Image (spheres, helix red, strand yellow):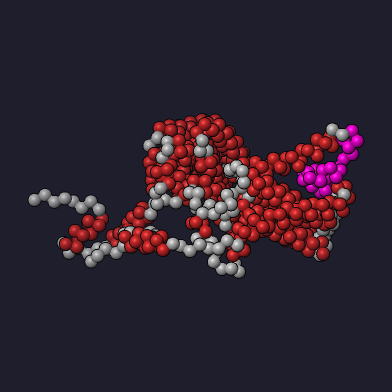
């Protein structure tokens, strides 16, 4: 009688039980690992499996991978032949590492991100995105699955080049920290560009504009790849000496915080673009905005501490300049974010209304994270106000202990922060009023609302500038009150020449007044959004969800949650 040999370790274990053979500890450990891997495979994103199969079987991936291997082979032979007999005693590692890094950066910054863009844009071109959106996968899972597929491709390219990079250790002149920093720059840069490409692919829904967007994306990726290549060459040329400086690690932490928060914001934005209209697409974005705000406050506090400790109470103008820089960055950031948030649709869906906070005391604060143009307007203003108050408090404290002095002065910094706040509040407020007036007659999408804010700002800058430049009396008179609506000229002249040059005693009355008027005119609609009551969940939906949960089979919720086999 012919017997079929066991094909798995589980079958072998079962056969061993029949013949009286006890399981070994190694076999028990392997069964435990195999069970966890099976649970992990059950929880794997199906988008990852689908995209990885398509990408690894495509002709484009095969050709690119073969080109990378061929270039590595050519670089190895040509580099060794170029060094010649000196390879036995010379430090040829940095040159070879630069060559391999150049080969690696090409697919990571061009091929992988553009493939991620096409994976999401093709779903809309081929009309398959509607089928994908009605599955049980959320928009966040769809974006994560496509991003993970790009990571898998990245790992394949890294596996092809990593033996060559390891070969540079034998050629001397290369240390492990430099190699690790290079690979971190390449991987993080590729992941960030892939995330940005996915966001662009989610936005590009019109087929006629995808050609233009594809060309612009390729140019952007080429520029980013050139920048990452230059950064890698600098790291190789500087060597390990730069890692001994504390300033390097401080800058690295700042850059890493910018990268993490921007990556989260881009991920939430891409998921929001492909989510259903009835979903809450604003709260995740605003949470990441608050994270970036917290990082900016942390950088400012860290710089204040470093300067205070290094100067030991000596006088300089660093703190006033820090307040001006913080006010500039914060005002520009929250104007851009506010211009997009105030363009949201004012009517909340019933699904969003069912998720509103129920606590009356906590609702006005948590409601700032809810969708809506009014909540978005107040959210931007509240964050900008908090940022400027913290920066001014730091500057005033530094002035009290004697850290500051010279130009720009603390007085200039205070005026600068007040004027910057006034401009943002006024432009966002009046822009939102225009959008609300237009929405009574026509449909105004978010893109059009953003353009309205931009046009309003450009009008406030361009009209007084044209009037003054075309006037014979005012052309050579420098800054005048004609430019009070021009934030660029006003703030620039204030920071450079002081309060008296811009007639600050007059502007301190006009600009905050205009901002307060804009804020008060928007308060009625803002209060209406913030005081919305939570809608109870219908009984029919509760019953349907209970039936679905009862009928759904039990599956592992994590790789460590494995169903026990019945005895």
Side of 354 relative to 458 (left or right): left
Where 366 sits versus 501, above or below? below
Q: Look at the image and say whether residue 490 sits in the magenta stretch.
A: yes
Residue 451 percent across, percent down from the top left: 65, 41
Total number of numbered labels? 0
Of residues 402 and 292, which is closer to you in this image? 292
- Seen in the image, is 50 located left or right of residue 534? left
In the rendering, at what x and y percent does residue 221 appear? 56, 37
Find the magenta span and give its range. Answer: 472-497
Percent coordinates x, y for residue 489 in the rendering: 80, 43
Q: Quadrant of residue 16?
A: bottom left
Q: Nearer the viewer, residue 341 or 33?
A: 341
**Front position in the image: 76 or 342:** 342
Q: Position of residue 184 (x, y in %)?
A: 54, 47
Residue 222 visible within the image: no
Q: Residue at x 68, y 44 (%)?
A: 453
Residue in view at x 74 percent, y 40 percent: 459
Judged by its main secondary structure, the magenta piece is helix
Q: Is residue 321 above or below residue 61?
A: below
């Amino acid at each position: 009688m012919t017997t079929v040999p066991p094909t798995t370790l589980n079958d072998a274990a079962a056969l061993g039980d029949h013949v009286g053979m006890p399981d070994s500890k190694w076999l028990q450990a392997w069964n435990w690992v195999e069970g966890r891997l099976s649970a992990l495979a059950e929880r794997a994103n199906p988008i990852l499996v689908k995209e990885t199969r398509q990408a690894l079987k495509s002709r484009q991936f095969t050709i690119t991978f073969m080109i990378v291997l061929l270039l590595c082979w050519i670089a190895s032979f040509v580099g060794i032949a170029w060094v010649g007999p000196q390879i036995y005693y010379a430090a040829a590692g940095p040159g070879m590492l630069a060559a391999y890094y150049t080969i690696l950066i090409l697919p990571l910054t061009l091929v992988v991100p553009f493939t991620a863009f096409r994976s999401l844009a093709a779903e809309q071109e081929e009309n398959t995105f509607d089928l994908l959106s009605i599955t049980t996968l959320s928009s966040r899972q769809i974006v994560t699955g496509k991003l993970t597929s790009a990571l898998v491709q990245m790992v394949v390219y890294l596996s092809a080049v990593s033996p060559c990079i390891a070969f540079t250790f034998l050629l001397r002149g290369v240390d492990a920290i430099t190699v690790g920093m290079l690979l971190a720059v390449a991987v993080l840069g590729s992941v960030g560009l892939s995330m940005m490409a996915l966001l662009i692919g989610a936005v590009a829904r019109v087929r006629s504009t995808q050609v233009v967007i594809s060309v612009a994306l390729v140019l952007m990726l080429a520029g980013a790849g050139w920048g990452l290549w230059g950064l890698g060459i600098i790291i190789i040329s500087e060597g390990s000496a730069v890692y001994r400086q504390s300033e390097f690690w401080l800058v690295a932490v700042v850059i890493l915080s910018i990268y993490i928060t921007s990556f989260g914001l881009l991920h939430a934005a891409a998921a929001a673009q492909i989510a259903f209209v009835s979903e809450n697409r604003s709260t995740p974005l605003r949470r990441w905005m608050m994270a970036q705000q917290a990082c900016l406050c942390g950088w400012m506090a860290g710089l204040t501490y470093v300067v205070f400790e290094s100067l030991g109470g000596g006088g300089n103008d660093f703190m006033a300049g820090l307040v001006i820089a913080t006010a500039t960055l914060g005002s520009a950031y929250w104007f851009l974010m506010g211009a997009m948030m105030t363009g949201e649709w004012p009517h909340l869906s019933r699904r969003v209304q069912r998720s509103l906070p129920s606590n009356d005391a906590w609702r006005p604060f948590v409601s700032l994270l809810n969708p809506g143009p009014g909540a978005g307007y107040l959210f931007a203003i509240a964050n900008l106000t908090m940022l400027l108050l913290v920066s001014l408090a730091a500057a005033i404290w530094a002035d009290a202990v004697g850290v500051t002095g010279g130009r720009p002065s603390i007085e200039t910094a205070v005026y600068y922060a007040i004027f910057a706040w006034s401009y943002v509040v006024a432009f966002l407020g009046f822009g939102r009023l225009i959008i609300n007036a237009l929405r009574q007659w026509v449909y105004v999408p978010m893109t059009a609302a953003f353009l309205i804010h931009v046009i309003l700002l450009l009008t406030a800058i361009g009209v007084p500038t044209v009037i003054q430049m075309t006037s014979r009396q005012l052309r050579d008179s420098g800054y005048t009150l004609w430019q009070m609506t021009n934030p660029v000229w006003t703030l620039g002249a204030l920071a450079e020449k002081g309060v008296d040059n811009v007639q600050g005693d007059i502007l301190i009355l006009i600009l905050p007044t205009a901002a307060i008027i804009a804020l008060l005119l928007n308060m009625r609609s803002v209060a209406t959004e913030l005081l919305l009551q939570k809608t109870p969940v219908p009984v029919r939906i509760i019953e349907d969800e209970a039936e679905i949960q009862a009928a759904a089979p039990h599956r592992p919720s994590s790789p460590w949650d494995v169903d026990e086999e019945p005895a």
